[in-house]
């Protein structure tokens, strides 16, 4: 099945609100924000510039497993860099490719260099499931003769 659509369409469905933090923020405070918002990652910003992504994976691998503490470690010490981004006009397929090749679960969306949203692997999976349901409905209608000629 061909996966059609753009990142812009995902953002139109899910919204473009993005939770952010700074490199100076303590990991504990970033984790608290993530818990309050029930999210798995924060985009790390220095002013208007995206400098990285801080995720639960960063915490588990770069704080806990290295014997650091979340109350003394700053986000900037452990964030995922270089930041890998996508644009609103990139395809969903390109989004999946970047996530897979880079083994990441979150992609900041930059439009003209400005943060325009965040796409997660869950967003992509939801898009694909919706597209599959739609294709199945069309095929079912075609087979049963309900598809318009």
Image (cartoon, grey):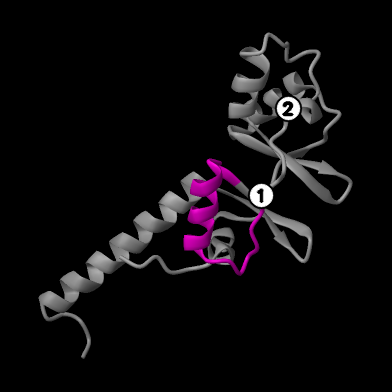
Does the magenta run of residues contain 100? yes
Q: Residues within 10 Å of mark 2 (few under 14, many from 20)?
A: some
Looking at the image, which residue is at 52% across and 61% down?
Answer: 94
- Seen in the image, is 143 located left or right of residue 122? left
Q: Is residue 119 above or below residue 134?
A: above
Instruction: Tell me the residue at 73%/19% (across/down).
Output: 28
In which quadrant of the rendered image does the N terminus lie? bottom left
Percent x, y of residue 38: 58, 32
Q: Which mark is residue 97?
A: none
Q: Is residue 71 above or below residue 108?
A: above
Which residue shows up at 65% across the image and 30% down it?
34
Pick the residue in front: 79 or 115: 79
> Residue furthest toward the right?
47
Point out the tag, 2 or 1, that comes first from the N-terminus. 2
**Residue 32 lies in quadrant:** top right
User: Residue 88, percent across and down?
Assistant: 63, 65
Mark 2–mark 1 Cα distance, whole angstroms, equals: 16 Å
Residue at the extreme bottom: 149
On the rendered structure, is 59 left or right of 131?
Answer: right
The residue at the far front in this view is 101
Range covered by the magenta-colored residues: 84-106
Residue 93 inside the magenta-drawn segment: yes
Q: Residues within 10 Å of mark 1 (few under 14, many from 20)?
A: some
Residue position for label 2: 78
Q: Is residue 68 above or below residue 20?
A: above
Taking 106 as reference, is 22 left or right? right
Q: Secondary structure at mark 1?
A: loop
In x, y percent, where is residue 92? 49, 61
Quadrant assignment, res 135: bottom left
On the rendered image, what quadrant is the C terminus found in? bottom left
Query: Residue 84 shows which numbered tag?
Result: 1
Provide the secondary structure element on which disc 2 rests: helix
């Amino acid at each position: 099945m061909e996966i059609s659509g753009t990142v812009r369409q995902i953002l139109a469905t899910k919204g473009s609100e993005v939770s952010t933090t700074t490199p100076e923020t303590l990991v504990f405070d970033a984790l608290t924000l993530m818990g309050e918002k029930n999210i798995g990652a924060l985009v790390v910003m220095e002013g208007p510039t995206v400098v990285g992504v801080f995720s639960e994976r960063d915490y588990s691998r770069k704080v806990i497993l290295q014997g650091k503490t979340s109350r003394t470690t700053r986000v900037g010490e452990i964030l995922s860099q270089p930041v890998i981004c996508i644009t609103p006009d990139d395809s969903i397929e390109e989004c999946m490719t970047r996530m897979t090749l880079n083994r990441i679960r979150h992609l900041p969306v930059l439009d003209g260099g400005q943060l325009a949203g965040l796409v997660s692997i869950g967003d992509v999976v939801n898009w694909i499931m919706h597209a599959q349901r739609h294709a199945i409905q069309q095929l079912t209608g075609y087979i049963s003769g309900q598809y318009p000629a």
